[in-house]
């Protein structure tokens, strides 16, 4: 049973601008919401996106798991990524 992320005003899964991401409420799994929150937080702290390896290490999962989450987040319109460009993952 996967849990869905419930949005609220102070949620870390919102984009760097503080606006809610363009994903309909309840559409992200808990794992996807955690990854999205990590990406947003990392960008606010460092000024650029984390690598897949950095996300995997921080979340203590395999890089393949992060790759799957990123693919799902892209499909759901929560993040964008430029093909072939490192550190290009951005919340929408």
Image (spheres, rainbow, N blue to C red):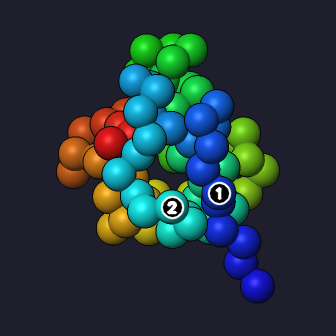
Residue 47 relative to residue 31: left or right: left
Which residue is denoted by mark 1 in the rendering? 6
Q: Tell me the CA gap for discs 2 and 1.
A: 7 Å
Is residue 22 at least partly visible in the picture? yes
Identified at 64% across, 60% down, the residue is: 5
* Residue located farthest toward the top when viewing the structure as drawn: 46
Q: Quadrant of residue 37?
A: top right
User: What percent of the width, then of the height, locates residue 38?
Assistant: 61, 38
User: What percent of the width, then of the height, locates residue 51?
Assistant: 49, 38
Asked whether the residues under the numbered discs 2 and 1 touch, taking CB atoms below 8 Å apart as contact, a structural biologist would say yes
- Closer to the camera in the image, 12 or 88: 12
Q: Which image quarter holds the C terminus?
A: top left
The dot on residue 25 is 2
Q: Which image quarter holds the N terminus?
A: bottom right
Q: Secondary structure at mark 1?
A: loop
Q: Secondary structure at mark 2?
A: loop
Q: Is residue 6 above or below residue 46?
A: below
């Amino acid at each position: 049973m996967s849990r869905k992320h419930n949005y609220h005003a102070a949620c870390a899964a919102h984009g760097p601008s503080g606006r809610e991401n363009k994903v309909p409420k309840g559409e992200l799994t808990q794992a996807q919401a955690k990854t999205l929150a990590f990406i947003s937080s990392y960008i606010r702290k460092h000024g650029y996106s984390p690598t897949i390896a950095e996300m995997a290490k921080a979340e203590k999962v395999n890089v393949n798991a992060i790759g799957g989450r990123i693919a799902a987040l892209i499909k759901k319109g929560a993040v964008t990524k430029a093909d072939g460009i490192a550190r290009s993952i951005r919340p929408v």
